[in-house]
Image (cartoon, rainbow, N blue to C red):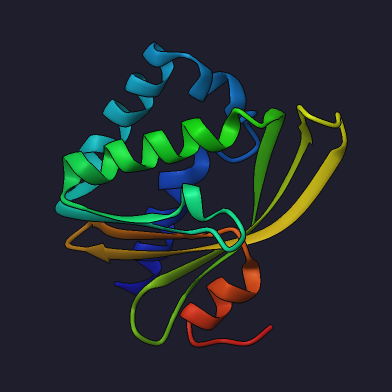
Amino acid sequence: MSQENVQFVRGLVAGLMGTDLVPIFAHEAQKRALADAFEPMLHPEFEFSASTRGMAALGGEYRGREVAVDGFMSTWSEALTAWDTLVFEIEEVRELPDGRNLLLNRSHGRSKAAGVEIEGEHGNIYTVRNGKLLRFEQYLDRREALEAAGLRE
């Protein structure tokens, strides 16, 4: 089952990786299409957790599929207002000893305020149950993601 879950996570994010997220989240119709595309892959008890050290206004815990999807969409819509462009790339997806999956990624983008190119290293933890995404934990700080996964850099 572990390789299945790793492949599930890769497939889940494949369409967003390497894509500029700013235009997607800037238009209501595109955001709705994105949410609709993910809906069949989400467990009825889906949860979204955004841990955003230094950006507390964008963090939060959202439980229940509808609430969690709305929380994800609003969190990302708000965060992306500060960017002209923002693209994420997968570095690695691996299964953790407890069955969760860790995705390590990089971002690169240009901020609106200063027009400066910025790069970052991040991590997400995915809990998959019965072929559906049960929990998505987002960490803007890679070290925090590794700690939550029970790992060190």
Instruction: Point out residue 95 in the picture as x, y percentages from the top left corner.
Output: 44, 75
Counting the numbered discs, the total is 0
The image quadrant where one finds the C terminus is: bottom right
Instruction: Point out residue 87 in the picture as x, y percentages from the top left corner.
Output: 67, 37
65 over 128 or under it: above or below: above
46 over 104 or under it: above or below: above
Foreground pick, 98 / 47: 47
The image quadrant where one finds the N terminus is: bottom left
Is 130 displayed left or right of 98 in the figure?
left
The part of the image, by quadrant, that contains residue 82 is top right
Foreground pick, 141 / 45: 141
Is 102 displayed left or right of 53 in the figure?
left
- Image point 74% across, 54% down: which residue? 120
Instruction: Point out residue 108 in the picture as x, y percentages from the top left corner.
Output: 76, 43
The part of the image, by quadrant, that contains residue 66 is top left
66 over 140 or under it: above or below: above
The part of the image, by quadrant, that contains residue 31 is top left
